[in-house]
Image (spheres, rainbow, N blue to C red):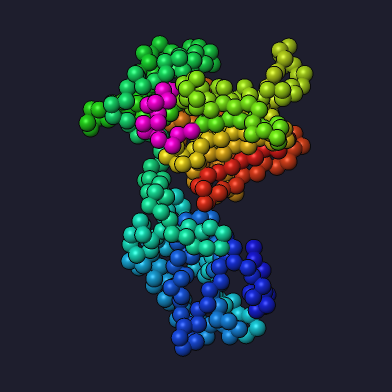
Amino acid sequence: MIKINNLADIFALKESVDLECKLASGNNGQGILPKEFWLTYSAFANTQGGEVFLVFEVFGIVNTQKVLDELWTSLNNRNKVSANLLREEDVRVIELDGKNIIHIHVPRSPRKTRPIYLKANPLIGTYKRLHSSDCLCNEETVRRMLAEQVEDSRDEALLENYTLDDLDRNSLKAYRQMFANRQPEHPWNSLEDKDFLRMLGAWRIDRDSNKQGLTRAGLLMFGQLVSIQEIFPNYMLDYQERFDNTIRWTDRITIDGMWSGNIFDFYRKTILKLIDQIKVPFVLEKDIRQDDTIVHQALREALVNTIVHADYTGRSSVLVIKYSDRFYFRNPGLMRIPLEIAIQGGESDCRNSYLHKIFRLIGLGEQAYSGIPKIYTGWQSQHKRMPVIEEQYELEQTIMTLYV
């Protein structure tokens, strides 16, 4: 929270990713809402929110009501801005040393109203905040925002003309074996592959058109690489071990044509590398040694979380790095809910909910609202540093780091 006690505090402020100061004097010095405010409003709303201070050098704003009236009128004019995110408590007049300053808190826009754009056209009026600048978004970025707005789950779409022939049958066979081992009496075990996939959400039938085929989730989870990259041209999965600073990596799993390249096999290969050489204390439960620890569980959850929240239409790769002192998880795509809410738990907005379901059916991945809280509590319970999650808006990616 920014504390403002006098005008000197205002002048000491430095513009940043979430702070902007704008002159609002107008030609006659009585006060006017600056045109540049709307760029910042869009940028803050489409990024992580921020604070705007409207000032008039050392004299303050004389006619604050005029500025406020213009603000509220314009916020509700759809030819000016696409949505009003402000509540009355987000706008306040501060009197400092006898001068008036207007403080406006711009919240981060919910996914369903993002992008916030100007001039009634998202393709030419959408901004995001980078460092201390309001930057016009390119068309590709805007279209991703629009897709995120209308698609609750990015992986549910039916892919016409994509069939079982586009799957890696060994991957599906391995998954079915894991499913049967976990639930040997489950009725789905007797289903044919197509019907089994439909139960998972990996195969869909459109009842209106009677068309059927793999979903994006089914293709990503079990598909052959060439078929996956037809739908997701920038699709890339990468695991690296970097224990020696003198070389780029000491071990690597990447899409090289030597294996299927799908998400399920990437998980199976990567998790073995991540948990390798993690110490397991001697613990008995019903006379059986337990080889699973909170650290193992946190790493599994972090890997699944990275995979199911990735935006596979983005340009960044899914990247997992094992260092000697930390684990690094990166996925393309920003978080759909604010970080503080994700850490607290109780609310979720999974980008690929069908992928999440497919993992959960074999015991991998927590319920939608509890994954990140479990990682945080589990990791901290081992007296380790608190996990760090950060969003990189310029590259549109999210990074989680677990320090050893």
Question: In terms of depth relative to the viewer, which is nearer, 256 or 229?
Answer: 256
Q: Is residue 280 above or below residue 332?
A: above
Question: In terms of depth relative to the viewer, which is nearer, 343 or 335?
Answer: 335
234 within the magenta span: yes
189 within the magenta span: no
> Going by the image, does 83 lie left or right of 384?
left
Residue 60 in the image: x percent, y percent?
57, 83
Residue 220 in the image: x percent, y percent?
43, 28
Residue 96 in the image: x percent, y percent?
63, 80
- Give the quadrant of the C terminus: top right
Question: In terms of depth relative to the viewer, which is nearer, 122 or 381?
Answer: 122
Q: Name the quadrant containing residue 364.
A: top right
- Give the quadrant of the N terminus: bottom right
Determine the residue positioned at 59% across, 33% down. 320
Extreme residue toward the left, this view: 209
Q: Is residue 380 visible?
A: no
Numbered circles on residues, count: 0
Residue 342 in the image: x percent, y percent?
57, 44
Q: Is residue 385 above or below residue 63?
A: above
Q: Is residue 88 visible?
A: yes
Q: Is residue 150 above or below residue 297?
A: below
Determine the residue positioned at 60% across, 25% down. 271
Determine the residue positioned at 43% across, 13% down. 189
> Going by the image, does 1 lie left or right of 43?
right
Highlighted magenta segment, given as a residue range? 222-236
